[in-house]
Amino acid sequence: MTSYDIGVIPGDGIGPAVLKEGLKVLEAVAAVEGFAYQLIEYPYSGEHYLKTKDLVPDRVIDEWRTLDAVLLGAIGHPDVEPGLVERSVILGLRFGLDLYINLRPIKLYAEHLCPLKGKTPADIDFVVVRENTEGLYSQIGGHLKKGTPDEVALVNGVYTWKGCERASRYAFELARQRAGQRGTGGRAKVTLVDKANALRPHDIWTRAYAQVARDFPEVETDHAYVDACCMWMIKNPEWFDVIVTTNMFGDIITDLGAMLQGGMGIAASGNIHPGKTSMFEPIHGSAPKYTGKNVACPLGAISAVGMMLDFLGDVQAAARVEQAVADLLRSGAVPSADARSGVSTSAMGDMVVERLRRR
Ligand code: IPM
Ligand code: MG
């Protein structure tokens, strides 16, 4: 029997509660599909930092490299300096394991979840491929004369040919694969989203993308500046298939995308290096105000488990998780994918498990 070693980082706030439901679904799908796994839990979080002053040590990053995948709940604590633990854990994983793709599907499962008038599941089904290890997240920069009237702050955007090339290639391969799954006549399109008019060096993206596109003659090419992309995502989301974009723009447009599919509670992501240990997480934060209230929506964490299974190559188990979530949402039993749905975190996990076993 196949067995996976999975690192688990429950984290802060609602992270542990939503991840618990994700693991409940993992247990159920493993029983149905017949695979085994071992969980290795890690304590890193804002909460843990306040108690121990521990951030992620290098030897733990090395240990993570030996696992099959890592699941993360959420990181962020109101009493800790903003970003300190997020940079250690989330960026530690992304940079430390060179997880150069942040894959964020934006798929509407049920019409009642969409805030756009007149848009249906047929209109909202695209994927954002966010470059995940460079851009404005490079951490190159800092302050000069901090706290004085002459203060200078520098945040540098770093774009490498390698980074632009591999993200573009991943996006084109994904578009080709999605078209194959849809069958003949399915559109395949990759939209490059950048700001190469105002930020001229962004044309490194234009050129790397164009070079990769030559290897995929059947895939349609497309381009939007990031501001226009936000507008099109609301006006005509059906135009998008695969978007490839920078780290920062990907961060921003995927929160917008999450709202199109029903809210932050439902959106999942994979931090991926094909063929190597990768990390899966809901895209929402730790939402401290909902800690311990059993109201957070666990569907993002559950879908992250589905994405992990797909990445591990268990396509059938992944499809089973996705179908269970889709069935539940289509049934109308969950009025919204947020903390005001009236369905508790644990009850929603149970409902997904029940539908997963039924199929
Ligand atoms: C995300 C988050 C992170 C990011 C934060 C927590 C560092 O917003 O995964 O989208 O900016 O990438
Ligand atoms: Mg974000």
Image (tube, rainbow, N blue to C red):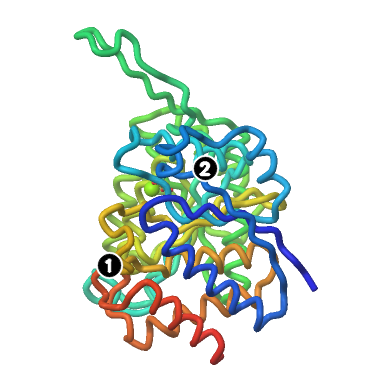
Secondary element type, mark 1: loop
Name the residue carrying label 1: 339
Q: Quick check: 168 left or right of 345? A: right
* Horizontal side of residue 311 vs 24, given as left or right: right
Specify the amino acid type for callout 1. Ala
Residue at the far right in the pictured view: 1
Say which label, 2 or 1, has the lower sequence index.
2
Q: State the quadrant of the C terminus.
A: bottom right
Figure quadrant of residue 96: top right
Q: How busy is the neighbourhood of tag 1: few (under 14 within 10 Å), some, or many (20 plus)?
A: some
Q: Could you say which quadrant of the image residue 6 lies in?
A: bottom right
From the top left corner, tell me how far across and down residue 354 is, in percent: 49, 87
Label 2 belongs to which residue? 132
Mark 2 vs mark 1: in front:
1
Using the image, tell me which numbered label, if any, was put on residue 206: none
Instruction: Work out whether 182 lies above or below 58.
Output: below
